[in-house]
Image (spheres, coloured by chain):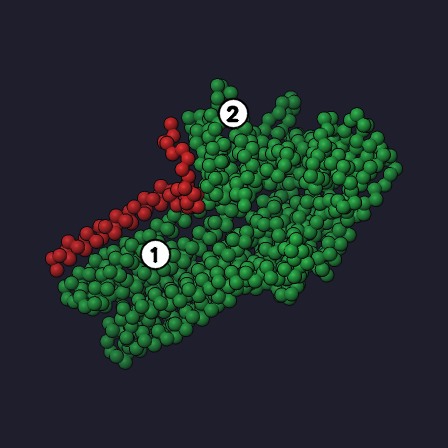
Chain colours: A green, B red
């Protein structure tokens, strides 16, 4: 297995390296000034995965005299390096540094600004875990001595020390629960943290009172170990979300940070997107994304709109065309007159729709909170009843208070508090290994409930990149010539040709005509590669390409030599994924912004009966809202800007890593691999997780049914309480770990399933 | 009883020392990149201090 040599596929790759790098201005804008003429840049390097990668990337950067420090973070797959802003009085061009990374074969790109605040919160949680763990261990040590028979003054001393340790810990580590419980109560609701807060506070107060009065029983150990266990659950939950978030922010930013504005006097200036005003003239180079809505005043280009409206084929644009923010100029340079600011652009319209589409996320109540809704009143009532019962019939109110407290401690939802997060962390880990990021635990709960799946077409069901379909019919020589021409263009069809060709002929003099094609002057004559009209040089010639497929013609002196056909191919695994969903009884629908024939063809090929074409972003969101009003729980899978409102309107949503920034933000799940199998897999694991959570609840409640009578009868000494609590927590955690075993069994079984595919079997015997 | 008066503070102090060490390592960012640290331990390249 070659571990660390990506990018050695061929010389063709080298040409591509210089494409796709962030521009010098963009890097300046994204870098941080450290003072002393030093600047720091953080880049996402998704390819690093081992020790050699670290050495390679750091070595490449450190070899440059401008770089003073470089460090790769393997967990977040990022590199941060510090460079001198000036060298010999000249401004540094940071692109040179990024090119050094790119030259080693690793992709490097800017990412959306990281949220540092979350890191601080995580550290606070870990600190609380450490401190409560320290306290729990020490108090347990003292408690064991008491249980083994320490008495009188020794016992009182131990109780006092325990109480002194537990007090500050209760405030420091308990604040997470107090805060959450308080905000729930303030809004007239109750959650799991309410019984937790009450139990730890009451048990502490009771134990302190006992200690002061030289009583034999104190529950300091139960109080603190409860905190310790629950904080572990909370921290795991947070770390899981953190990991997913950092993986998602590490994906390349698609929207530009700034653009080159041409001033009235003709001078050019790079400005952040927010500072572009209507009326400004913006220069767009080939390969740039349009930063704001605008009208073309000069230039010609092909515009890739796939991410904005799902249209799969590029559209020609010239003077007078209006362009939406987020579209990509492929082949030519344009001068654009901005018609709106970034905040009023197309994107903001989408954001407005997203806010209006109040999705499942806002209305959904976490399963743990729903359980707490019934659980906490029942528990509190039980404690109150045993207090009154023992007080009235026993006559000893102090004894009654002790028993009520022990009921609260025994029933304190330690296992319930762990039941959900532990399962979800294990499930998220399984998904993570399969390249699926989960934004939050509730997403898995929601995904387990769905009954229908809505797919976007371009970029979701299809790969969003055209592929050569008639390679077998074309001669290798023609392909070589065509690839040589295509190498000079960013048009998706050209790139498809280049990636299909094994070698490319060298052409010295190639010009690109936006909207038409490429032309090369050679000794043999004039080669043209482009649409049929352009290649044959006759304006009246009509293309033969159907509405579904696109074609490119190669000609020599207007004599057609070869026709290449392309189609936007389904994502790998799309067929299998749709079939798997159908088997499970899900209803599948295609919602596309593309034209009807294309959508119909793809839907038929994948075996999806229900499809809608030419939908606007609002119509997509309305469809989702309509389905949920009809009682369906829908999963929306989409990638484009136009899908974002639907993604937030759906009960739960998923997006591929190639999605627009806003789509990735709106989605609950993001899958990083190419294959669409991620969809059924995520549903499957979420359902198993849901089953395990319910099992865990059953276990926790069953434990309570056994333990509560003991507490009410007055036999729950601190020793009994802590044994009961730890065993129930352990059982719940062990049950959650079963998910790992189930998922492994499934992975082991799947090769047998695919082995029935004849081509795989053929490959195996070949 | 009198030996407890010495032993308990000693035990607490030593436990506290461990806790302090952990909190310090957390603060100095030693848990930021656990995967990377696992690999860096195996890197026997140039480990001279940077000039």
In the depicted view, which residue is nearer to us: A115 or A677? A677
Whether residue A514 is visible here, answered yes or no, is: no
Name the spot of residue A671 as percent of width and height, x first: 57, 51
Asked if labels 1 and 2 share a chain, the reply is yes
Q: State the residue at coordinates (29%, 72%).
A: A716
In the depicted view, which residue is nearer to us: A312 or A743? A743
Q: On the image, which quarter does residue A650 sit in?
A: bottom right
Quadrant where the N terminus of chain A is found in the figure: top right
Label 2 SS: loop
Q: State the residue at coordinates (54%, 64%).
A: A687
Which residue, given by chain and number where applicable, does mark 2 sit on?
A92
Name the spot of residue A551 as percent of width and height, x first: 78, 42
Chain letter belonging to callout 2: A
Left or right: residue A766 compared with residue A600 = left
What separation in Å lies between label 1 and label 2 (alpha carbons)? 51 Å
Name the spot of residue A475 as percent of width and height, x first: 78, 40
Name the spot of residue B51 as percent of width and height, x first: 38, 27
Label 1 SS: helix
Q: Is residue A328 above or below residue A670?
A: above
Left or right: residue A638 compared with residue A100 = right
Which residue, given by chain and number where applicable, does mark 1 sit on?
A174
Q: Which mark is residue A573?
A: none
């Amino acid at each position: 297995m070659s571990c660390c040599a990506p990018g050695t596929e061929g010389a063709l790759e080298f040409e591509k390296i210089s494409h796709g790098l962030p521009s010098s201005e963009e890097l300046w804008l994204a870098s941080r000034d450290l003072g002393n003429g030093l600047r720091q840049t953080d880049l996402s390097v998704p390819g690093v995965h081992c020790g050699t990668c670290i050495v390679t990337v750091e070595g490449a950067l450190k070899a440059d005299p401008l770089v003073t420090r470089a460090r790769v973070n393997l967990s977040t797959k990022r590199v941060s390096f510090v460079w001198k802003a000036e060298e010999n009085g000249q401004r540094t061009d940071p692109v040179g540094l990024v090119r050094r990374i790119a030259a080693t074969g690793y992709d490097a790109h800017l990412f959306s600004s990281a949220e540092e605040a979350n890191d601080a919160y995580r550290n606070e949680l870990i600190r609380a875990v450490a401190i409560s763990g320290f306290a729990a261990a020490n108090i347990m040590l003292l408690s064991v001595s008491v249980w083994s028979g320490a008495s009188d003054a020794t016992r009182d001393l131990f109780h006092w020390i325990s109480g002194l340790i537990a007090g500050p810990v209760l405030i420091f580590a308990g604040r997470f629960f107090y805060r959450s419980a308080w905000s729930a109560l303030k809004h007239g609701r109750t959650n799991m943290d309410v019984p937790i807060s009450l139990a730890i506070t009451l048990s502490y107060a009771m134990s302190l009172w006992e200690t002061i009065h030289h009583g034999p029983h104190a529950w300091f150990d139960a109080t603190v170990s409860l905190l310790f266990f629950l904080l572990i659950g909370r921290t795991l939950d947070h770390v899981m979300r953190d990991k997913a978030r950092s993986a998602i922010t590490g994906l390349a930013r698609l929207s530009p940070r700034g653009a080159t504005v041409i001033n009235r006097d003709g001078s050019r200036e790079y400005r952040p997107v927010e500072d572009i005003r209507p009326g400004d003239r913006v220069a767009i180079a080939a390969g740039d994304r349009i930063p704001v809505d605008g009208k073309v005043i000069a230039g010609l280009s092909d515009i890739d709109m796939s991410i904005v409206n799902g249209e799969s084929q590029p559209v020609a644009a010239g003077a007078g065309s209006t362009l939406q923010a987020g579209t990509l100029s492929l082949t030519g340079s344009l001068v654009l007159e901005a018609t709106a600011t970034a905040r009023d652009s197309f994107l903001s319209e989408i954001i407005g729709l997203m806010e209006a589409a109040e999705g499942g996320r806002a209305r959904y109540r976490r399963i743990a909170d729903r359980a707490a809704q019934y659980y906490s009143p029942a528990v509190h009532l039980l404690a109150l009843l045993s207090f009154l019962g023992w007080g009235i019939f026993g006559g000893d109110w102090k004894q009654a208070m002790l028993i009520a407290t022990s009921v609260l401690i025994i029933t304190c939802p330690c296992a319930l508090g762990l039941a959900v997060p532990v399962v979800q962390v294990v499930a998220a880990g399984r998904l993570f290994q399969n390249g699926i990021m989960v934004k939050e635990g509730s997403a898995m709960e929601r995904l387990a409930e769905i009954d229908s799946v809505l797919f976007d077409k371009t970029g979701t069901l299809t790969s969003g990149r055209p592929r050569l379909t008639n390679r077998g019919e074309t001669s290798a020589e023609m392909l070589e010539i065509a690839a040589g021409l295509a190498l000079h263009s960013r048009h998706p069809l050209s790139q498809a040709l280049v990636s299909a060709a094994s070698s490319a002929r060298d052409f010295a003099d190639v010009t690109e005509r936006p909207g038409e094609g490429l032309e090369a002057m050679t000794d043999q004559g004039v080669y043209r590669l482009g649409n049929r009209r352009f290649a044959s040089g006759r304006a009246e010639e009509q293309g033969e390409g159907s509405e579904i497929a696109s074609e490119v013609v190669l000609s020599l002196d207007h004599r057609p030599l070869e026709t290449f056909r392309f189609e936007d191919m389904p994502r790998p695994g799309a067929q299998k994924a749709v079939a798997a969903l159908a088997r499970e009884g899900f209803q599948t629908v295609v919602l596309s912004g593309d034209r009807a024939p294309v959508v119909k063809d793809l839907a038929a090929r994948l075996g999806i009966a229900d499809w809608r074409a030419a939908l606007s972003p609002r119509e997509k969101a309305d469809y989702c809202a309509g389905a949920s009003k009809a009682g369906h729980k829908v999963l929306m899978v989409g990638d484009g800007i136009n899908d974002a409102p639907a993604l937030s309107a759906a009960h739960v949503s998923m997006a591929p890593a190639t999605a627009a920034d806003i789509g990735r933000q709106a989605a609950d799940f993001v899958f990083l691999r190419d294959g669409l199998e991620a969809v059924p897999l995520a549903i499957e694991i979420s359902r198993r997780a849901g089953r395990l959570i319910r099992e865990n609840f059953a276990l926790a409640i069953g434990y309570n049914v056994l333990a509560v009578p003991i507490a009410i009868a007055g036999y729950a000494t601190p020793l009994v309480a802590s044994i009961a609590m730890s065993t129930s927590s352990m059982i719940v955690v062990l049950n959650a770990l079963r998910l790992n075993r189930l998922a492994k069994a499934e992975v082991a079984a799947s090769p047998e399933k695919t082995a029935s595919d004849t081509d795989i079997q053929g490959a195996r015997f070949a | 009883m009198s030996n407890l008066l010495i032993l308990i503070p000693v035990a607490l102090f030593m436990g506290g020392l461990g806790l302090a060490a952990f909190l310090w390592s957390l603060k100095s960012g030693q848990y930021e990149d656990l995967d990377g640290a696992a690999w860096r331990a195996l890197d026997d390249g140039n480990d001279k201090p940077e000039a």
